[in-house]
Image: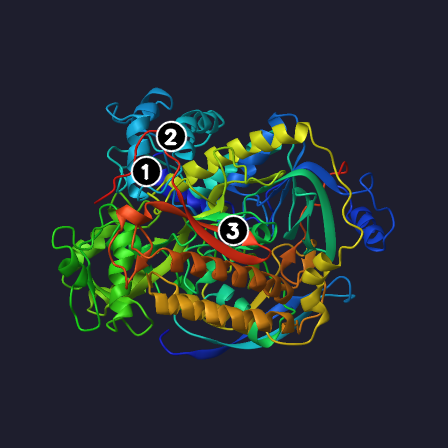
Amino acid sequence: MLMDMDERGRSYEKRDMIADDIQYNVVKQYAVIQSLFLSRIMGENKGVENMLKADIVIIGSEGAGARAAVEVARHGMKPLLLTKGKIGRSGATVTAMADFEVDSKSAVEVLGLKGDIRDSKEKFFEDTLISGGYLSNQKMLERHVNDIPEIAKEMMDKGMKVAQELDHAAGQTYPRSVMTTGPEFMRILIKMCKEENVAVYEHFMATDLVKKDGRVIGVVGLDLSTGEFVEIGAKAIIMATGGGMQMYPYSTAPDELTGDGHAMAFRAGVSFIDLEMIQFMGCTMMTPPAVEGQGFGYGLCADINPLDCWLLNKFGTRFMADKDPIHKEHVTRDKLAVGMMTEVFEGRGSEHGGIYVSVSHLPKQIVDNYPQSKNVPYLSKDWEMFGFSYKQIMEEAKAGKALEMGVASHFFCGGIKVDENGYSGIPGFYAAGEVTGGTEGGNRISGNALTQILVQGKAAGAAAADFAKTAGFEEFPKDMAEYTERVNGPLSREGLSSFEIRKALQKVCWEKLCVVRTEESLKYVLEQVAEFKKQLPLVGCKAKNKIYNREWVDALQLESLITLTELVATSALQRKESRCVHYRHDFPDTNYKEFTMNNILENKSGRIATHFEPVVVTSIVPPKEA
Amino acid sequence: MDDKKLVKVKILRFDPTVDKEPYYDTFEVETQTSYSVYNALEYITENLDPTLAYYASCRIGACMGCLARVNGKVVRTCTTMLTDDIVVEPAKADNILKDLVMKCKPLPEDF
């Protein structure tokens, strides 16, 4: 189905304002499940028979997880989706602004859209590889470009509305962006889940994977609706928890993306790849509070067809024009973020740690015309976006007040190391979507995220289901104290405030592990992590209620964030060069000779071990020099 | 509204495991230009009363997770600015898990 641009804009608003949640599956009373939980906690009814279980448990219910669940069901296995939040109302997918990439030729021939048939899958592969600094796993990238047309076609056949014409994202040789919206994208995935009778366990925060004889046999966590510790058996697990953008105080990502999946995976012994590669969106709002981290400014200054805004440091220098006289402000995301944050790093930033943006050099009518621009269908003529009004802010800007903008964490390019089937190397453990690394390499072109989550979700769902066909359920260990203590510890203690420690951690990450990094700043982060680790066992909740206790959840998320911060800082310390989104002020150049390698972290008896590995090559050998 | 000002945020509270009846709590919050009801709920939980329960996710107006009844009307709390005294209630009064959080659908029978 085709949607015009106006319709695309409106569809954000069209999601009804009725209080009903997305109607999901059938149900049984909580009490029954609860009594099952309680009996298990009391030590009765242990054993596989009485266990809450599903063939494949998928942690994370949005893009990658939902697509994986559909595939699991189609392979004859029973999936269970877990989510800390609510399906369709949490996670990063629904916030996508939103395009997915398909090579232009397939977009014409398979999807029936208007594109450029000179394009090819090979060219799409090459553009993504180059944009990612040659760090992509080329086997994964082959699936990325080969599998997406059919996956997208099915979603369109099921009614996903897209714009007829492709957009052309920076870094792509041909137009490849199939335009839709995050909510529309999720509407279809949820429809597909319903068709396959996929069950969803909402308000469930997974906290640990359980292993036996080297194999993952299930997951445990906290049911936020009851406050009970819950064990769930599985033949295989698919991790689809997304990135860990909440390491930073400014983020375009939802509040719950706290790296729980990364932390669980690390404790379970999986490896990570290129985790230092965190993409920041430039020109995001820093103030006022309601619009913190929002991408409004990115569209205004830097995206396709922006206004000709000037990015100024606090002394009025138009620094992007200095750094790149040809493209000025209109550079790729990585260059924009580095350009902005170098000003901040070198002491020329704005009051809140960003930079200034001027539109007052433009005639007022020209500024007023901007909402009609093609690339901002979600912006109303009256400067309203997603329900937020920017009218007053823009009136002040036209009158000469500089807008204050910064960067915000946007996407994790690196993550759990998996192969092209989403397999982690640990039997029974698969991962898909933004929690993984390897597809995008060191940078992500606009639109490749939605392509990645669909392709990987489908691949991991199929591979996990195949594994499950010959695997059985295993009994959990008798002694679960290690797992229950992680969950129940903060609630049972009086002590330090997780809110305060989280904010302190985010401040450290913002100041020392953000876009511009040095050996000194990274070592400082690791010293601070050691302190935070000492504080963690002293964190206690003031709130003692068991049902939906946000302070408790925050304390559990804090542990994930501390683990993730240590992993990212360690990874960033190893890469002594600048490449793509990883910028080292002390090594500003790309070192093609030594560092066109994947940066690997391993768990050696609970400590992080590091090494570099050659990238997986199928067709394009990375250059040895620039 | 340029100046900071104190407003009263009256919130319906209910923990079915403890309370017989829902009741209201009122918190004083300092608001400013472009300060949302979501900002206030986060502030209250982190500074005034950590037992307050609300659901929110994207805080950019996209996910529709943070729906609540503000002064009688169901709105997204993240896109609703706090400019004056308000009353915040759950979007649906008959389906409360705790405070402003709705119950979700339990699992199917065969798990």
Query: Where residue A128 is drawn, which disc sits there?
Result: 1
The residue wearing badge 2 is: A145
| Type of the residue with mark 1 | Thr
Cα gap from disc 1 to disc 2, whole angstroms: 9 Å
Q: Earlier in the sequence, mark 1 or mark 2?
A: 1
- Locate residue A272, reporting x and y percent: 48, 49
Q: Quadrant of residue A438?
A: top left
SS label for mark 1: helix
Q: Quadrant of the N terminus of chain A?
A: top left
Tell me if label 3 and label 1 are in contact, CB under 8 Å: no
Residue A116 in percent (x, y) is at 25, 26
Q: Residue at x 41, y 63 (%)?
A: A250
Three-letter code, disc 3: Glu
Query: Hey, which quadrant is residue A23 in on the image?
Result: top right
Q: Which residue is at the front of the view, A304 or B37? A: A304
**Figure check: A533 above or below A152:** below
Q: Residue at x 61, y 76 (%)?
A: A496
- Chain of the residue where label 1 is placed in the rendered structure: A
Determine contact: label 1, label 2, CB under 8 Å: yes
Tally of numbered discs: 3
**Would you name the residue on which mark 3 appears?**
A602
Could you tell me which chain the residue with mark 3 belongs to? A
Q: Residues at marks 3 and 1, common chain?
A: yes
Label 3, label 1: how far apart the Cα atoms are? 26 Å
Query: As rendered, which of A549 and A597 lies closer to the eye?
Result: A597
Q: Secondary structure at mark 3?
A: strand
